[in-house]
Each structure stands twice: as structure tokens, then as C-alpha cells.
């Protein structure tokens, strides 16, 4: 297996954790996101687009080497979806990042994203049947967008 593709698809081997690799990928993303400086919105979107595109390529490499249509160890899709879900929280100042309210938003984001990713309501469910890398990526991207929109609504209240 291509080692670069494996490194990316497993998000630095987090996807190889035998218990709940998708949840572990989402949790690793949350931790990574929390401890990295937040970029301006347009740069974050550009970076997400690049990661999505590069992941499409690396997932296609992996799919050529396996019979599995959506291997569990591929968690880069959860990384992208979780990162999208966290977008509304990127505007908090560093001094706010330890506040109880901010921590509640982070926990809520994680729970909502995982619920949408696991339960796959409506279009999230249907998108996973698109063949190839796009089907693997899209369900988590949509789950991330839905979580993001709900979080924007909650924060706006």
C-alpha cells in the first residue's frame, strides 16, 4: 500500500486504532484544531479544499488496492467533516478558548457531528452510495456542514 496515501487516509495512523476509528479520527481532529492557531476564514476554506482534493486522490489509490468500498481505517473524511463543523468556533479569541461556554460548544460540535455521521439522516445517507472517493468524503462533508449550520444557529441566539 502506498505509504503516503496510508498516512493521509488514516490521519497519521489514527484510523488504525481498532476501536471506533471514525470517532477517534474526529477526536484527533478536535484536539489538533484546538491546539493550532486559527487561520483567517478564507485560508481555512482554501486549506480544507486542498485537503479534500488531495484526500480524493489518496483515497482513490487505496481503493484500487482493496475490495472494501469504504475501509474503516480511512478517517480523513471524518477529519474534513469535523473541521467544517468547527468553523463557527474559529472566531473565538484565544482568551475565550478556555471558557466554559466555549468548551460546551466544542463538546456539542463533536457530539452533533458524530451523531450525524453515525446515524446518517436523509441526504447524508444517500451520499455514501456515490461510488469511489467522492462517496466516502461527501457524507462526512455534509454532516460537517449540517453541524456547522446548527452551531451557527445556536451561537446566534
Image (cartoon, rainbow, N blue to C red):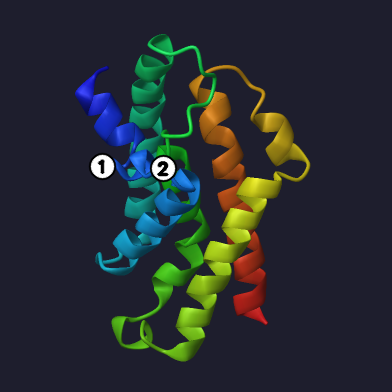
> Which quadrant is the C terminus positioned in?
bottom right
Question: Which residue is under mark 2?
Answer: 18
Query: Hey, which residue is sitting farthest front in the picture?
Result: 18
Please report the residue visible at 49 percent of the width from the left and 48 percent of the height from the top.
20
Q: Is residue 108 above or below residue 18?
A: below
Left or right side of 64 for 1: left
Left or right side of 62 for 117: right
Q: Is residue 40 visible?
A: yes
Percent across and percent down for residue 120 are 70, 44
Percent across and percent down for residue 35 are 26, 68
Please report the residue visible at 34 percent of the width from the left and 81 percent of the height from the top.
93
Q: Is residue 39 visible?
A: no
Whichever of callouts 2 and 1 sits on the residue coming sooner in the sequence is 1
Question: Which residue is under mark 1?
Answer: 12
Q: Is residue 138 above or below residue 3?
A: below
Percent across and percent down for residue 70 are 53, 26
Please report the residue visible at 65 percent of the width from the left and 56 percent of the height from the top.
115
Please report the residue visible at 55 percent of the width from the left and 43 percent of the height from the top.
141
Assign a secondary structure to mark 1.
loop
Neighbor class of circle 1 (other Cα within 10 Å; few <14, some 14-19, many 20+) is some
Task: Depth check: give the residue in front, 155 or 22.
Answer: 22
Neighbor class of circle 2 (other Cα within 10 Å; few <14, some 14-19, many 20+) is few
Which numbered circle lies on residue 69?
none
Percent across and percent down for residue 66 are 43, 13
> Which quadrant is the N terminus positioned in?
top left
Q: Measure the alpha-carbon separation of dots 2 and 1.
A: 14 Å
Task: Depth check: give the residue in front, 63 or 124.
Answer: 63
Check contact, mark 2 vs mark 1: CB within 8 A: no
Amino acid at each position: 500500500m502506498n505509504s503516503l496515501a496510508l498516512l493521509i487516509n488514516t490521519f497519521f495512523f489514527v484510523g488504525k486504532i481498532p476501536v471506533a476509528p471514525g470517532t477517534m479520527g474526529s477526536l484527533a481532529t478536535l484536539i489538533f484544531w484546538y491546539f493550532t492557531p486559527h487561520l483567517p476564514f478564507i485560508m481555512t476554506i482554501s486549506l480544507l479544499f486542498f485537503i479534500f482534493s488531495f484526500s480524493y486522490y489518496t483515497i482513490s489509490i487505496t481503493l484500487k488496492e482493496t475490495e472494501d468500498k469504504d475501509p474503516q481505517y480511512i478517517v480523513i473524511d471524518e477529519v474534513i467533516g469535523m473541521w467544517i463543523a468547527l468553523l463557527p468556533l474559529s472566531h473565538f479569541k484565544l482568551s475565550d478558548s478556555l471558557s466554559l461556554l466555549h468548551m460546551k460548544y466544542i463538546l456539542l460540535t463533536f457530539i452533533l457531528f458524530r451523531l450525524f455521521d453515525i446515524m446518517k439522516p436523509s441526504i447524508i445517507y444517500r451520499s455514501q452510495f456515490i461510488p469511489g472517493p467522492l462517496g466516502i468524503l461527501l457524507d462526512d462533508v455534509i454532516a460537517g456542514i449540517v453541524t456547522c449550520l446548527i452551531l451557527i444557529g445556536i451561537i446566534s441566539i
